[in-house]
Image: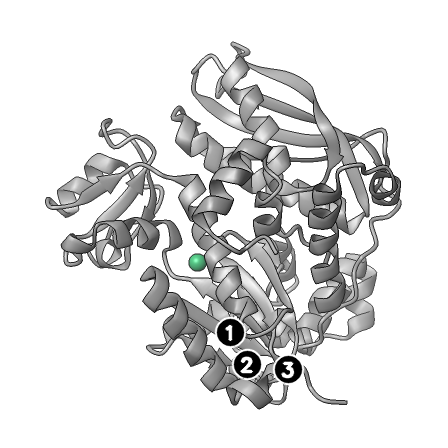
Amino acid sequence: MMKKVIFLVDMQSFYASVEKAKHHQDTDRPLVVSGDPTRRSGVILAACPLAKQYGIQNGERLWEAEQKCPNLIMVPPHMQEYIDNSLVITDILESVTDLVEPYSIDEQFMDVTHSQKLFGDPYDIAKHIQHEIYSKLKVVARVGIGENKVLAKMACDNFAKKKKDGIFHLKKEELEETLWPLPIEKLFRAGGKMSRHLRKRAIRTIGELAQTDVNKIKRVWGIHGQVLWMNAHGVDYSPISLSSTNGQKGIGNGMTLPRDYSEKAEIKVVLLELCEEVCRRARMASVMGETVTLGISGASYDIRTGFHRQQKMSDPTNMTMEVFHYACQLLDKFWDEEPIRRLHISLSSLMSDQTVQLNLFQQDRAQSINLGYTTDEITNKYGKTAVMRAASLLPASQVKERSAKIGGHYK
Ligand SMILES: [Mg+2]
């Protein structure tokens, strides 16, 4: 069987690059995206590579950044534009292969196995994609290449991003020299918590995990450990089935923030991430939810602030941007502008996605949903929510607006 060639295409400093393209007259000035640029206590959400050269980091206060760099350009975030740009990138990737899976707003997987006859070897294809994206959007793309998604993702994060040409092919037969010396934290999905557990048992590098007896790993960490062990060997795993997910309880995800958030733009960025994760899990479990719940609370445990509210959506869904839309409505309606320390989103009133599909009267929506699933099915079975696809499912008014902007995307 022919080895697959999978790419992970990642955008460098995506939000900041999109903003910078709008300020093209100031290419040599550093730029940051910040929650509320009029307030010096605002926080940096994204910094362009030039700003990073000045030592400016995401999460830093605006006034600190200004001290490092007096001629800094500061702009507020424009989420809709980032989503639009992401769709343009999907279009570019789809001109090479129809097997494209948006993974997050600035990362997309693609299978170019059968594009090689037409577009050349993987390196040539990667070059071509970088060129297309840059000439259209002035955004730098990095490409990780591997025979499966895990290798492509690790190729990008650990190697391509550090190379001048932004391209790296992580080959399974070379892992001992390339991947194994890296610290265990660099293993895709090892996560902070799991890495700490592994370190406690003297597994400090990816290679040390790979060389541990898999049965021992299985005994201690179960299926999650086994999957990580396989990943360390460059083997991509079959999905952990979540089909037993309890429909009553719902699927939720929460986050305790590193500090108080008091700017709505910042909160929405976190909210989008939470929605993305919840919807991804819903799709893995083949369910959709009809109710979205948003819980937020303040920093103090003595004085309880915040709220816990839910809303029924117009249709059951597992699409990130639909859920995000309702979550934002709840935030707009109930948030009293007190600083927030903890956020929680959940999707409940779950039902099988099969039931939902059968009951769809709106042809457009059925098609959009199917498109998302088809992409998932073909490329693999991770079940990630295709956030860009989902973006096409925002309420009609916005769809129209966007279709006008990106002609021809909605085939
Ligand atoms: Mg990126």
Answer with left or right where residue 133 lies relative to residue 233: left
160 or 116: nearer the viewer: 116
Name the amino acid, label 3: Thr
38 or 80: nearer the viewer: 80
Say which mark, if any, is on residue 170.
Answer: 2
On the image, numbered disc 1 is attached to which residue? 144
Position in image of residue 114 (x %, y %): 65, 83
Position in image of residue 3 (x %, y %): 69, 86
Q: Is residue 70 above or below residue 220?
A: above
Q: Residue at x 78, y 72 (%)?
A: 214
Answer with left or right where residue 361 lies relative to residue 127: right
Q: Residue at x 36, y 56 (%)?
A: 13
Q: Is residue 140 visible?
A: no
Q: Earlier in the sequence, mark 1 or mark 3?
A: 3
Label 1 to label 3, Cα distance in Å?
14 Å
Answer with left or right where residue 322 lies relative to residue 67: right
Q: Is residue 197 above or below residue 209?
A: above
Label 1 to label 2, Cα distance in Å?
7 Å
Q: Nearer the viewer, mark 3 or mark 2?
A: 3
Give yes or no for contact between labels 1 and 3 (Cβ–Cβ under 8 Å): no
Looking at the image, in which quadrant does ligand 1 appear?
Answer: bottom left
On the image, numbered disc 3 is attached to which residue? 113
Q: Earlier in the sequence, mark 1 or mark 2?
A: 1
| Label 2 Cα neighbours within 10 Å, binned few <14 / some 14-19 / many ≥20 | many
Q: Earlier in the sequence, mark 3 or mark 2?
A: 3
